[in-house]
Amino acid sequence: RVATGCPLFMTESIEENDDTSTNETPNAPIIPKRLWAALVSHSSISPDLVWGDASKAMIRSLANNLASFPLKTTGFSSFKEEFVTAGGIFLKEVQLTNMESKIRPGLFMAGEVLDVDGVTGGFNFMGCWSTGFVAGGSAAEFCSIVNSPEKI
């Protein structure tokens, strides 16, 4: 069923002899279930629809929502209610020198997508900015190497 997830957004099994393996459950969704259900609903897709019965227009609508889901900010909460997210990509799956995925070369990550928890009050901002700086520079370097005239 479309509402339960998309095979393209599921974790893959990692070979047992790979030292980057994690405690992740193979074939677990990488998009949280509640978010996926909201995206499917916002795309006007029935929760009971089977993938094989989804029209191109439905899939296009879902893809558009995945890429640019509109969110309206209505305000902010009181102080001390803003929390950092917990969980994320395990650090042992990331080359910390350049923030590149050990599992998906060419994928760079930073900030709160990583499984790092810290005290609020600026420490998480610094972690986001620092890993963002490293990941951004590394991604730019990666792209310049991949797109160099010698590679084309």
Image (tube, grey):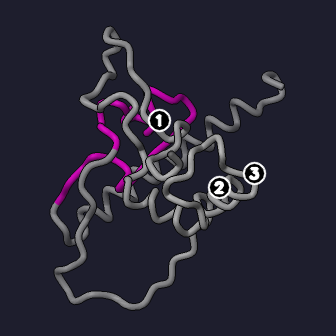
Q: Quadrant of residue 50?
A: top right
Q: Earlier in the sequence, mark 3 or mark 1?
A: 3
Q: Which mark is residue 56?
A: 3
Q: Name the amino acid type tagged 3.
A: Lys
Q: Name the amino acid type tagged 1.
A: Glu
User: Residue 102, image x and y in percent?
Assistant: 43, 27
Q: Which mark is residue 65?
A: none
Q: State which region is magenta.
A: 89-118
Q: Taking 95 as reference, is 57 above or below it?
A: below
Mark toward the viewer: 3 or 2? 3
User: Residue 9, image x and y in percent?
Assistant: 50, 41
Q: Name the amino acid type tagged 2.
A: Ala
The local crowd at label 3, few if under 14, some if 14 to 19, many if 20 or more residues have their Cα within 10 Å, is few
Taking the image as shown, residue 150 lies to the left or right of residue 125, namely right
Q: Quadrant of the C terminus?
A: top right
At a point 17% along the width and 80% down the height, the residue shown is: 80
Contact between labelled residues 1 and 3, with CB atoms less than 8 Å apart: no
* Element class at badge 1: strand
Q: Which mark is residue 100?
A: 1
Contact between labelled residues 2 and 3, with CB atoms less than 8 Å apart: no
Instruction: Say how many tags the image has.
Output: 3
Q: Quadrant of residue 81?
A: bottom left
Query: Which residue position holds label 2?
Result: 63
Q: CA distance from mark 3 to mark 2?
A: 10 Å
Q: Taking 107 as reference, is 63 above or below it?
A: below
Towards the viewer: 88 or 92? 88
